[in-house]
Amino acid sequence: MALLEVIDLSKSFGETVAVDDISFDVEEGEIFGLLGPNGAGKSTTVSILSGILTPSRGKVVLAGMDVVHSPLAAKAMIGVVPQEVALYDELSATENLSFFGRLHGLSGPRLRERISSMLETVGLGERAREPVKRYSGGMKRRLNLAIGLLHQPKILILDEPTVGIDPQGRVRILEVVRREAESASTTVLYTTHYMDEAESLCDRVAIMDRGQILVQGTVHDLKMQAGQKDVVKIAGSFPDEDFASTFSDIAGSKVGTVKAEEMLISVDDAKGALPLIIDRLTSRGASIRKVEVEEPTLETLFIHLTGKELRD
């Protein structure tokens, strides 16, 4: 069941169209990625979904409620982690969490329990009493995430949450998002221009550019739409024969190069085809030492669709 529905949504600023008639839905409990380069319209879309901006056309429905017509009820269900860190530098992590928790109606033992839990979750428990101005960029990002999760929102909206932080901090944030989605059944809308994050984290994705959604679906489905294939690289020794017809019944198969100690085969779905490929080769006398699968990426898909690098 769709928790969030975005229907024919558009937003213009004067003559500039930032969001151009987009539609998508996010199922309850899933992680949905909104992907695209800087300036694609992702942040404007997030601002509309969270009730900060009013759409020029279209509507956003959250749990059956129109976000524009019922803003307070809708906002109570949303946790937002903005692209720009939103913290009070002179306050400690605990004080920041307490302030934002009270804005969401938390108080007393319940607020203290949630603050303690979130500090532990994002790894800031030992530095909870320090002023935020002493924190690194990654620590501030993690505290920002804790604030977004504090009131246990029905849907968590993250806008480029890992921009400008070190690899360790980035991994920690992704782990927290994944764990919260699984353990607390939190629905997540995740915007990013880092394709590896989307591939490892998201159930479904939509690729956005120039205010429009180009394609959407699972990562595997999108690769198939673009005609991208997996490449199976096999190291070993192979008998001197023509292998072209050996795999003809495997969907999308094509034998690339066959050298004395290496064979390349492109297929639609390597995971499903690999056991059959290995069985066919060994039955024909091949000796296999190593098998690697190179999958197409969302970045190659974006280039295929737009003809430019994703981070342009």
Image: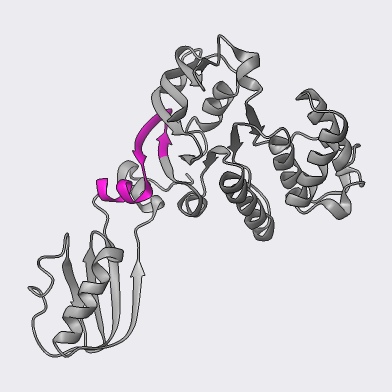
Residue at image coords 10%, 67%: 248
Picture coordinates of residue 200, whole percent (x, y): 49, 55
Residue at image coords 52%, 26%: 45
Q: Is residue 103 left or right of residue 28?
A: right
Q: Which residues are magenta?
A: 206-226
Where 173 falls versus 147 (above or below)?
Answer: below
Quarter assignment of residue 294: bottom left
Picture coordinates of residue 40, whole percent (x, y): 47, 33
Question: How many marks are shown on the rendered structure?
Answer: 0
One can see residue 136 in this view = yes
The residue sitting at the top extreme is: 69
How is the structure coloured here?
one colour
Where 268 falls versus 209 (above or below)?
Answer: below
Residue at image coords 60%, 19%: 74
Q: Is residue 139 left or right of residue 177?
A: right
Quadrant the N terminus occupies: top left
Quarter assignment of residue 247: bottom left
- Residue 221 is a magenta residue: yes
Where 250 falls versus 132 (above or below)?
Answer: below
- Residue 126 is a magenta residue: no
Give the camera-side residue of 109 and 118. Answer: 109
The residue sitting at the front extreme is: 109
One can see residue 88 in this view = no
Picture coordinates of residue 171, whole percent (x, y): 63, 57
Picture coordinates of residue 204, whole percent (x, y): 42, 43
